[in-house]
Amino acid sequence: MKSLNQYWQQRDLQHVWHPCTQMKDHEANIPLIPIQRGKGVWLYDFEGKAYLDAISSWWVNLFGHAHPYIQSRIQSQLSELEHVLLAGFTHRPVIELSEQLVRITPKGLEKCFYTDNGSSAVEAAIKMSFHFWKNHHQPQKKKFVCLSNSYHGETLGALSVGNVSLYKETYGPLLFEVITAPSPDAFLAPKDVDIITYTRQQFEKIKILLEKDADCIAAVIIEPLVQCAGNMRMYHPLYLTLLRECTEKLGIHFIADEIAVGFGRTGTLFACEQAGIVPDFLCLSKGLTGGFLPLAVVMTTSTIYQAFYDDYHTQRAFLHSHSYTGNPLACSAALATIELFEKNAVIKNNQAHIQYMKTHTEKWRNYPYVADVRQTGMILAVELMAEPHSQTPFAWQRRVGLQMYREGLQRGILLRPLGDVIYLMPPYVISETELSFLIDQVDQCLQQVALNIQSECA
Ligand code: PMP
């Protein structure tokens, strides 16, 4: 007799091909978890087992699952209009959302171009930057600069400007070349160099690359403050301030990819605020709709916009489109999300969570195999390594992160480690009791996995 979970698992494996997954793992090794419903920070399978969603379902969920206010806003929009193309037509949610986004993002970003996922927002920003220079009679400005260990999505353009080999290497022959500068990753800073000096040193390296090729470079693309998919590596905001100054001086665009870090993840509403910068392009997605519906946006300045604005016959327009651009339901979810931020003083109230996570995870620094515990706002990461002192990673074949994932599931928490980096990125509605439960369970997982490793080594 099959259990309800098994029933859905087996039906799924007949036809569903899951993202970022070796499907064979699901046949024996790693059971697929069918989820029936969600409420707040909890996900429930078909047999009622609860999992605390410690990673906000790939960082999208801000206010918990099935949030009644976001639901109601989508429902009332649904009874009026589900979708209309955004070329030649418009609608209230997209107009209102654009007004709100301009209001809440760093001053100077005045135009909103919508896509329906993060990668396609990055694609649009890259194309816009190149096209801007072309419209300004500088078609040779077509190179892009990115950081080592950066991640900007999986479509070919976004993958080209990323640098995580796990995702990129296989498709290398299909990608365009980029200039890659060493990242200012604080974890890699020599122990005897203070963070400010190190940040300046790393900045000098990218500055040399930018100065050398400024005539050919369209833009630098960067994830402000945290390289999330690149194992939650973090860096000092000074790097962004220096880089922004430099790009402005050299006539190079600055693309801030806040797809993962936007909407409060780093402690401020947008990470760029901590560096006091305004980028030429700001890419947003994930938390934009509170995790309800797919939507992304590229925000840019009037200066960029004006380079495309002309009589039709000059052929300067940005002829890029996606069928679901600016979907009214998704825009309504985004409007509800922005309202919740303000109604509930979320940024201010998150300070208590940030402090709680900091205080209660400090002791993990002394646990075996813990090479680093780092935190930027609502993102807390623990890096496990075979030899923390020399920063020697575990052989990837050991899949230590996977052991943590399994231990977590047994204890009712959903972690999805990046390699051997475990991180907490919970929905903001998490209560102190839930946060305490989560941290206790991770604590037990860390101890159990350390025991497993020790017994494997014995
Ligand atoms: N940029 C960053 C910084 C991301 O973290 C992600 C997704 N993890 C993307 C772009 C791509 O977004 P999507 O998965 O919606 O295509």
Image: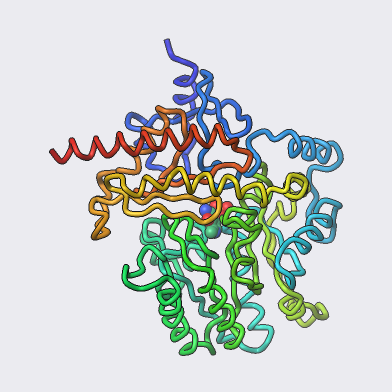
Residue at the left extreme, as displayed = 458
Q: Residue at x 40, y 73 (%)?
A: 182
Q: Is residue 455 above or below residue 224?
A: above
Name the residue at 55% across, 73% down. Answer: 240
**How many marks can you see?**
0
Q: Is residue 35 above or below residue 457?
A: above
> From the image, which quarter does the N terminus lie in?
top left
Q: Quadrant of the C terminus?
A: top left
Q: Which image quarter: residue 453?
A: top left
Where does the image place residue 296, in percent across and percent down from the top left? 66, 56
Look at the image and name its color scheme. rainbow
**How far across and how far down the image is residue 363, in percent?**
38, 45
Dividing the picture into quarters, in which one does residue 218 lie?
A: bottom right
Is residue 350 at least partly visible in the picture? yes
Q: Nearer the viewer, residue 231 or 368?
A: 368
159 lies left or right of 294: left
Q: Is residue 355 left or right of residue 205?
A: right
Say whether residue 315 is visible.
Answer: no
Q: Is residue 35 left or right of residue 124?
A: left
Q: Is residue 347 above or below residue 63?
A: below
Identity of the residue drawn at 58% across and 78% down: 244
* Ligand 1 positioned in quadrant: bottom right
Residue at the location (79% across, 42% down)? 82
User: Left or right: where does residue 327 sit relative to residue 386?
Assistant: right
On the image, the x and y values in percent for residue 59 come to 55, 47
Spot occupied by residue 156 in the image (x, y as percentages of width and height): 50, 62
Q: Is residue 343 above or below residue 102?
A: above
